[in-house]
Image (cartoon, coloured by chain):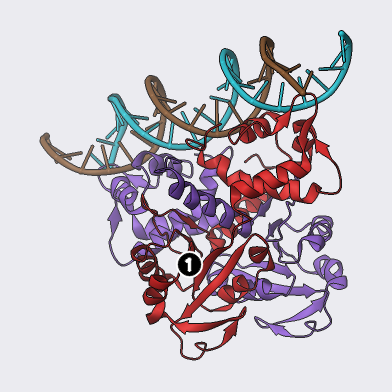
Chain colours: A red, B purple, C cyan, D brown
DNA sequence: TAGATTGTTAATCGATTAACAATC
DNA sequence: TAGATTGTTAATCGATTAACAATC
């Protein structure tokens, strides 16, 4: 229904629905919640309830129109708009992200990339020249940036986050192994790759130990 | 208590506790669940319940001993053991991961890296030579590999996952924008960076729209 | 129309929080 | 000992699943 009060967890699933409908384009005209559930390894109830938060996209007795859902979910996620992001930290990970073709495909454009190291400053990464991090605040004051991505070492991350926050950047996507706390005016997504490696590793070892039963 | 029946969600939080206690080493001898909760932006109840799944690590009237918890959580997560992983896909992201110092620090060692492109095969990445992906199955038959990391394009990912599964690799960490389904004998963690970017972006736009209320 | 399938409400399940007795 | 703080059980909250009337 409305756009308010949608549970966080539903929002986190939204891009996956989008990805699914995108992949179905051309392959079929419509799909029922049951068929989609089988495809996505989830439940039909969850799909219907999740999608109903955004409007009545389905049709009784018919299902969901693939082309329409792709378009609607794309709109909801803002995939049709150009949005700017900057990267702080031009190391290997920063460079990998700067060159992700998928980011470009969903409308995200790299506006700037910053580093502290003289050896990388001036290099061209993803069509953008690496600038000294001292200029980050000034840059943000002049350019509208929706998302700041942090790919610095852990020690530098909180300082960079403060600069992003002070400059009014919309939100932060943090890859440094430190937790950046969100505030009322700025959401943050922390992606801790080592944490995911370790929890996966625990699950594997747990399976090896007993004859499993985590679930 | 036991090692069975621990909720998945607790396991996902475990590395964060480990990281926290690691950061506290040398700074203080002990910490109470309440102090830790403040530090981690979570609740004392959750911390006590989470940790109690693995044993009585605390002491009434004292709290948790930092040095001890760091050691215990490290053991539980297997940080003390050497574990091998391979990477399929020697693009920018694969190379970034191969060079993560944090992976090495938690005991993970790159055993092999594979690609389909002749231009990168033979290159040295993180001290390991890139091999042709045709040799992946044979390599896995000879080397014990706990985790297979997928950093290929979406199209190649399911095929690589099948090779990992058939070879009996412990688990998969997948970065390709496609969902690899876990099976009873092999856990999978899908990390979809674009999905996280989009859901964060939605939250930012939602804040801009109304005067917010997602939560 | 009859059959299919949605959107939505109610029932169930699981996770988080609160409370407190045990105990250092 | 008295005070502090855990481990654990009970209460609450939220998310998932099941059921079904609405309706294409």
Answer left or right for B68 relative to B29: right
The picture places residue B16, in percent across and down from the top left corner, at 46, 55
The picture places residue A167, in percent across and down from the top left corner, at 36, 66
Q: Quadrant of residue A81?
A: bottom right
Task: Say few, some or many: other residues with alpha carbon within 10 Å of mark 1 (under 14 / 14 to 19 / 20 or more).
Answer: many
Q: Nearer the viewer, residue B20 or A139?
A: A139
Q: Is residue A58 above or below residue B205?
A: above
* Count of numbered circles in the view: 1
Q: Residue at x 59, y 53 (%)?
A: A78
- Residue tagged 1: A176
Mark 1 belongs to chain: A
The picture places residue B98, in percent across and down from the top left corner, at 64, 74
Q: Is residue A82 above or below residue A1?
A: below
Secondary structure beneath disc 1?
loop
Q: Nearer the viewer, residue B144 or B104?
A: B104
Answer left or right for B112 relative to A118: right
Q: Nearer the viewer, residue A125 or A191?
A: A125
Q: Is residue B56 above or below residue B172?
A: above
The picture places residue B87, in percent across and down from the top left corner, at 72, 69
Q: Nearer the viewer, residue A61 or A215?
A: A61
Q: Residue at x 74, y 85 (%)?
A: B123
Residue B72 visible at all? no
Q: Residue at x 40, y 63 (%)?
A: B22
Residue A149 visible at all? yes
Answer left or right for A26 relative to B182: right
Figure quadrant of the C terminus of chain B: top left
């Amino acid at each position: 229904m409305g756009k308010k009060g949608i549970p966080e967890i539903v929002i986190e699933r939204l891009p996956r629905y989008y990805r699914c409908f995108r992949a179905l384009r051309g392959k079929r005209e419509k799909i029922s919640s049951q068929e989609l559930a089988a495809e996505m390894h989830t439940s039909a109830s969850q799909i219907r309830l999740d999608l109903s938060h955004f409007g009545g996209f389905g049709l009784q007795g018919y299902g969901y129109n693939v082309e329409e859902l792709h378009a609607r979910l794309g709109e909801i996620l803002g995939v049709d708009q150009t949005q700017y992001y900057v990267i702080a930290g031009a190391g290997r990970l920063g460079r990998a992200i700067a060159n992700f073709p998928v980011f470009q495909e969903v409308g995200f454009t790299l506006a700037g990339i910053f580093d502290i190291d003289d050896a990388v400053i001036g290099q061209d990464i993803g069509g953008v020249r690496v600038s000294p991090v001292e200029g980050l605040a000034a840059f943000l004051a002049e350019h509208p940036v929706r998302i700041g991505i942090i790919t610095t070492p852990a020690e530098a991350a909180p300082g960079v986050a403060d600069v992003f926050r002070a400059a009014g950047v919309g939100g932060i996507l943090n890859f440094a192994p430190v937790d950046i706390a969100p505030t009322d005016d700025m959401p943050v997504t922390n992606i801790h790759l080592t944490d995911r490696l370790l929890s996966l590793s625990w699950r594997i070892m747990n399976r090896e130990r007993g004859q499993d039963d985590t679930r």
